[in-house]
Image (tube, helix red, strand yellow):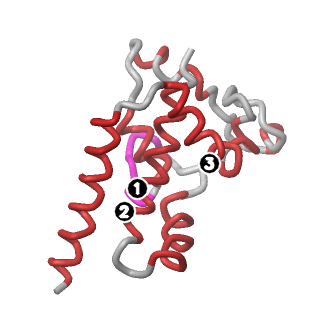
Amino acid sequence: MRLHQSMAVLLGALLAFGWTLSSNPSMAQRKLVGSEEFQVSCAVCHGPDGRGNGSMAGYLTVKSGDLTRLARDNDGRFPFLEVFRMIDGRHEIGVHGTRAMPIWGDRYKVEAAVKYGPYDTETAVRGRILELVQYLEAIQR
């Protein structure tokens, strides 16, 4: 039964991701979809414009990064999967060292479980993170 549920969640996530790719929303649309999530979850540290100047930035022990330069700092390519995994936080990424940022995947999972129940939770979590990553890709300069 667990395998069946896992396959259903994976299929849902793949279908949602496929729809996102096939619908190919403009950068302006992506910016709008993930912007609200960014303002709620990230702006306090990374700043409303993503440049690391949030209201809590001065209190952090690790400097908040400029999220508008992710592509530029990666030879002009936006590091989509790495950003997704960093936001999710549920899988440790060895090269990043100690985790200073909150693990949003856990927080989103708890919130989604209340709203969607045990079957659609993971799909909702991944969709929410995907919207946020697409927003970050849209604000690259």
Q: Which residue is mark 2?
A: 123
Q: Earlier in the sequence, mark 3 or mark 1?
A: 3
Q: Secondary structure at mark 1?
A: helix
Residue 126 image label = 1
In this view, 89 is above or below 32: below
Q: Secondary structure at mark 2?
A: helix
Magenta region: 90-97
| Foreground of the two, 88 or 132 | 132
The Cα–Cα distance between marks 2 and 3, rounded to whole angstroms, is 16 Å
Q: Is residue 93 magenta?
A: yes
Q: Amino acid at mark 2?
A: Thr
Residue 37 image label = 3
Q: Secondary structure at mark 3?
A: helix
Residue at 41% in and 24% down: 78
Q: Specify few, some or many for label 3: CA neighbours under 10 Å numbering under 14, 14-19, or 20 or more.
A: some
Image side of residue 62 versus residue 92, left or right: right
Q: Amino acid at mark 3?
A: Glu
Residue at 41% in and 13% down: 76
Asked whether the beta carbons under mark 2 and mark 3 sit within 8 Å of each other, the answer is no
